[in-house]
Image (cartoon, rainbow, N blue to C red):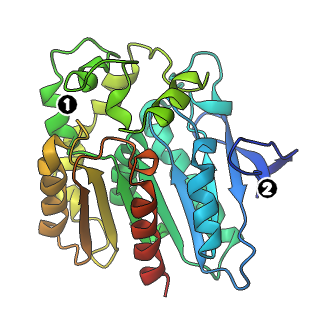
């Protein structure tokens, strides 16, 4: 499926296959990481779409748990992130944010071809979940289930941030005691410190990045567009109540209501009291991981 590269070792586990594909949008090389389960037969495949100012290899711990549950895992570094950075971190390139969600679709198509007998799921976090909301409208046929983590009702969030300087995410930390500026990510200080120490995380964003994320937010709120989504597609929306993107869970419930009103019949909301933005790196991450894997397992058949 991909151009092979030598395996790379990360702090959590060995990446079995570090590879890449060329985006059909503008020829940017998109890096990918595959963690293969030893289970035979495998239960399914989970594609991971990471968030803003981070990268796919941060999901090694989650991938190991998914492997133990019988799932192959493939994560990518989005354009402008991780090993897919061309010039400037956070720069989406000529195809812009639409190119990012098209890359997710392209990878999904490749995974269906590689694993034709296994159900394919999408786990998408934060910015990845914003892109996934576009993917739901355009290509809900690709997946047997989708998990949106650290997500939001994007048009409402965009309106609330209209007066914030472009690229300035410090507003998200306003409700927390300041130590690093990234307290909004997790209650676990060690996880926050690891994020701060990672040279591929928390970089300054180009002024064009955040407006690009919000640029088509109204499309995601249009009932006609939402009605294009397969009504039988299972959807899990999960967040911490202290995630500033969730507004205490209100924006999560609003998003779920929109999908239900569009006819989707299997929409689950799971909120974790007190948890912040990166629920996979929270103090209750074992609970979060187990719940997500349980949901995936139930729908893998």
> Dot 2: what SS?
loop
**Would residue 236 appear left or right of 50 to someone viewing this image?**
left
Q: Which mark is residue 16?
A: 2
Q: CA distance from mark 1 to mark 2?
A: 38 Å
Is residue 144 visible in the rendered image? The answer is no
Which residue does the image show at 30% across and 57% down from the upper left?
Answer: 238
Q: Which mark is residue 79?
A: none
Is the residue marked by circle 1 packed among few (<14), some (14-19), or many (20+) residues within 10 Å? some
* Residue 91 spot, x, y in % from top left: 51, 22
In the rendered image, the residue lying farthest to the bottom is 301
Q: Report the residue marked by disc 1.
A: 158
* Closer-to-camera residue (260/48): 48
**Would residue 39 appear left or right of 154 to someone viewing this image?**
right
Which residue does the image show at 42% across and 83% down from the upper left?
Answer: 298
* Residue 107 spot, x, y in % from top left: 60, 54
In the rendered view, would you say 79 is above or below 275? above
In the rendered view, would you say 142 is above or below 189? below
User: Which quadrant of the figure has residue 78?
Assistant: top right
User: Are the residues at dot 1 and dot 2 in contact (C-beta closer than 8 Å)?
Assistant: no
Query: Which quadrant holds the N terminus?
Result: bottom right
* Closer-to-camera residue (291/37): 291
User: Which quadrant of the figure has residue 210?
Assistant: top left
In the rendered view, would you say 15 is above or below 197? below
* Residue 232 spot, x, y in % from top left: 31, 79
* Closer-to-camera residue (189/14): 189
Is the residue marked by circle 2 packed among few (<14), some (14-19), or many (20+) residues within 10 Å? some
In the rendered image, the residue lying farthest to the right is 6
Is residue 217 visible in the rendered image? The answer is yes
User: Which quadrant of the figure has residue 89?
Assistant: top right
**Would residue 165 appear left or right of 18 to someone viewing this image?**
left
In the rendered view, would you say 101 is above or below 253? above
* Closer-to-camera residue (251/109): 251
């Amino acid at each position: 499926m991909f151009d092979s590269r030598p395996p790379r070792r990360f702090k959590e586990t060995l990446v079995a296959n570090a590879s890449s594909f060329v985006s059909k949008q503008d020829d940017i090389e998109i890096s990918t990481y595959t963690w293969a389960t030893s289970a035979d037969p495998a239960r399914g495949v989970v594609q991971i779409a990471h968030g803003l100012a981070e990268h796919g290899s941060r999901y090694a711990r989650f991938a190991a748990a998914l492997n133990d549950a019988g799932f192959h895992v493939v994560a990518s570094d989005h354009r402008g992130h991780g090993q897919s950075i061309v010039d400037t971190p956070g720069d989406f390139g000529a195809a812009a944010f639409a190119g990012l969600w098209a890359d997710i679709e392209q990878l999904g198509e490749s995974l269906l071809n590689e694993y034709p007998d296994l159900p394919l799921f999408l786990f998408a976090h934060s910015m990845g979940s914003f892109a996934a909301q576009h993917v739901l409208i355009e290509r809900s046929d690709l997946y047997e289930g989708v998990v949106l983590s650290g997500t939001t009702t994007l048009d409402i969030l965009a309106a609330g941030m209209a007066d914030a300087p472009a690229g300035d995410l410090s507003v998200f930390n306003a409700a927390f005691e300041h130590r690093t500026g990234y307290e909004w990510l997790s209650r676990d200080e060690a996880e926050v410190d690891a994020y701060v120490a990672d040279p591929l995380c928390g970089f300054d964003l180009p002024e064009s990045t955040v407006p690009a994320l919000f640029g088509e937010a109204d499309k995601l709120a249009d009932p006609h567009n939402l009605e294009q989504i397969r009504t039988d597609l299972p959807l899990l929306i999960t967040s911490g109540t202290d995630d500033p993107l969730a507004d205490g869970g209100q924006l999560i419930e609003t998003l779920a209501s929109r999908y239900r009103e569009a006819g989707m019949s299997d929409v689950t909301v799971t909120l974790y009291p007190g948890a912040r933005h990166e629920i996979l790196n929270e103090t209750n991450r074992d609970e979060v991981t187990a719940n997500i894997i349980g949901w995936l397992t139930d729908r893998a058949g």
